[in-house]
Amino acid sequence: MPSYPFPWQRTAAGANLLSSTGDLSVTIFEEITALATKHSAINLGQGFPDTDGPHLFKEQAAEGVAGSLNQYAPGGGILVLREAIAKHQQRFYGLSVNPETEVVVTTGATEAIAASILAFIQPGDEVITFEPFYDSYGATIGLAGGIHRTVPLNAPDFQPDIADLRAAFSTRTKMIVLNNPHNPTGAVFERAVLEEIVYLATKHDCLILSDEVYEHLTFGVPHIPIATIPGAWERTLTLSSVGKTFSFTGWKVGWAMGPAPLIAAVRTVKQFLSYSSGTAFQPAVAAALDSPTEFFDAFARDLGHRSTVLAAGLESAGMTVYRPRGTYFVVADVAPLGFTDALDLARRMPKSIGVAGIPLSVFCHAEGAQRTKTLMRFAFCKKLEVLTEAAERLSHLSTKIGS
Ligand code: PMP
Ligand code: GLN
């Protein structure tokens, strides 16, 4: 047995995100999902919808498998998909992207994150993320030997403080990773924040990695890709995937787009991670991206309604709720119910009350974990009756689990 820390655990958060049992194979998402399954609990922990995306695209993927789409796709992705990705950026954001040179298809956004960080980060380089941060950022920065700096996002609106943002940059900063809309807080960053990021990234000559997997999941506020801010394009890699927008998290088709030299570097690393990605899914994803605008709007409206239903349920259960402006997660504070440790509570909830959630502290380094100790993330990409039942069960939280 090799000794700790493994390279990807160099950051404290790399360790946080793993189960406390010392089992190296599971992240907190796996751990809580396994507990939810074991106790037949409603799983509002790991973020995945309980209803699949449109049947039409499932059929198209199935036809690909039944037909002849069963061998390697080109490493960068099939051209039809790269063209659809470019067309989507033009339609929604007015961005002109060259599908031949400025797009690469990846195995989910996860691989796009890993390939982008591994392509540009050398040991000792500093990488900034906001905190709480999505698990794979910390792990991949650790794998690359980078130094992970964080900028806190605090309740109630989870917007960064500009002074904190400025203070996080140094002469060794090579990249800032942005996740907008933001998992787990549900924040959608203000334009002024995006402009400041571009200004600082330009001043320090560093890259911007913008994870926009929740780009279509905003409620009453527009999504602004940071690549559209003047001066950003030449230093920005933008990532997204089929998982969230189309409710196909298991397909694991994602992409990165940006200026040709940056994409060439990401594609080179991607070759050695997976070489190519899900051939049969790629034409189906291209067709999905071509959906009428009303499809995207209706999906966001529907999710916005679910968010309101779950938030109201959590509030009546006695929690303080920070209503999200995007993503499919809502953050609630369990302190008003007398609980002092959301991680401990999350491990007990599936068995005791039949509902699972994810504590925010696992998305943080040690100091941030203290700040977020009583916060819990709940996913609302579930059927309405499931959300209502979860809220009902959660209303018995303090009586069933003594604080
Ligand atoms: N980034 C963020 C912020 C996410 O929440 C997720 C998945 N939940 C991913 C990336 C991974 O996306 P994919 O499943 O396409 O790899
Ligand atoms: N991104 C999903 C979430 O935040 C989980 C994906 C995973 O398990 N890696 O819940």
Image (cartoon, rainbow, N blue to C red):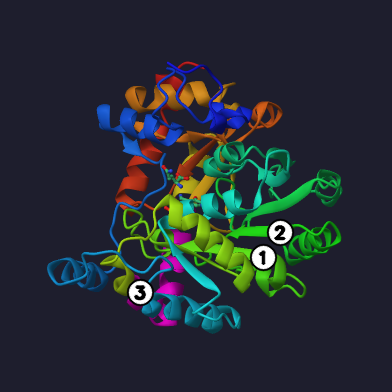
Measured from the top left, where is residue 357 in percent x and y?
44, 35
Above or below for 154 versus 352: below
**Residues tagged 2 and 1 counted as in contact (Cβ below 8 A):** yes
Q: CA distance from mark 3 to mark 2?
A: 30 Å
Q: Earlier in the sequence, mark 3 or mark 1?
A: 1
Residue 62 falls within the magenta-colored stretch = no
Q: What residue did someone put label 2 on?
A: 207
Vertical comparison of 51 with 14: above or below: below
* Quadrant in the picture for the N terminus: top left
Residue 236 image label: 1
Residue type, label 2: Leu
Q: Position of residue 13 (x, y in %)?
A: 59, 31
Magenta range is 285-309
Q: Mark 3 or mark 2, which is nearer to you?
A: 2
Q: Is residue 120 left or right of residue 204?
A: left
Q: Circle 3 sits on which residue? A: 288
Tell me the mark number nearer the camera, choosing from 3 and 1: 1
Name which residue lies at 45% across and 24% down: 19
- Residue 304 in view of the camera: yes
Residue drawn where x is 64% and y is 37% of the image:
145
